[in-house]
Image (tube, rainbow, N blue to C red):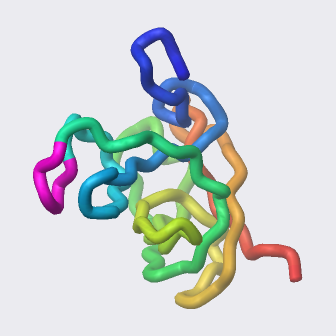
């Protein structure tokens, strides 16, 4: 854990994906909160994800939203159903399709290191 008692993840420069699990109801959530979004119980437990999952949705971005993203056009935004049971948005290879099995690595995007998904090796 970091000095704040939280696991480091990609938002803090660590090559990791972190999610939370509620000790009361078992709900899993990707966005960090001080409470469970399902039942309101305090202090969900942070866990590190495997980086494996399945593509739920994909959207190829062909128009830059900012000058920083212009160099990356076209880029793919994907919704991933993580093997652990939560859903997250991330970047991914442009050829990903719904139901593809994927694994994460971390790649630079617009000056930050972000989760980036590619087809899993068979």
Which residue occupies the extreme front position in the image?
Answer: 24
Q: Give the x, y percent position of residue 84.
A: 53, 66
Query: Is residue 75 or residue 19 the one in the foreground?
Result: 19
Residue pictured at 47% horizontal, 65% vertical = 77
Q: Give the x, y percent position of residue 12.
A: 50, 25
Residue pictured at 54% horizontal, 62% vertical = 75
Q: Which residues are magenta?
A: 36-41
Residue pictured at 11% horizontal, 50% vertical = 40
The part of the image, by quadrant, that contains residue 67 is top left
Quadrant in which the N terminus appears? top right
Establish if 7 lies above or below 118.
Answer: above
Q: Give the x, y percent position of residue 95.
A: 66, 80
Query: Is residue 97 or residue 28 the one in the foreground?
Result: 28
Decide if residue 52 is on the left or right side of residue 85: right
Residue pictured at 54% horizontal, 36% vertical = 10
Q: Is residue 83 visible?
A: yes
Establish if 93 lies above or below 44.
Answer: below
Which residue occupies the extreme right position in the image?
Answer: 122
Quadrant in which the C terminus appears? bottom right
Q: Give the x, y percent position of residue 85.
A: 46, 70
The part of the image, by quadrant, that contains residue 61 is bottom left
Instruction: Give the prevailing secondary structure in the magenta stretch.
Output: loop
Decide if residue 38 is on the left or right side of residue 16: left
């Amino acid at each position: 854990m970091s000095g704040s008692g939280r696991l480091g993840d990609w938002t803090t420069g660590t090559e990791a994906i972190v999610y939370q699990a509620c000790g009361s109801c078992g709900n899993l959530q990707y966005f960090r909160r001080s409470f469970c979004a399902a039942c309101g119980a305090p202090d969900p437990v942070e866990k590190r994800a495997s980086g494996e999952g399945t593509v739920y949705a994909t959207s190829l971005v062909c128009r830059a939203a900012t000058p920083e993203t212009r160099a990356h056009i076209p880029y793919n935004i994907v919704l991933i159903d993580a093997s652990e049971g939560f859903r997250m948005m991330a970047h991914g290879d442009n050829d990903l399709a719904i139901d593809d099995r994927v694994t994460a690595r971390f790649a630079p995007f617009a000056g930050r290191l972000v989760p980036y998904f590619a087809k899993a090796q068979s």
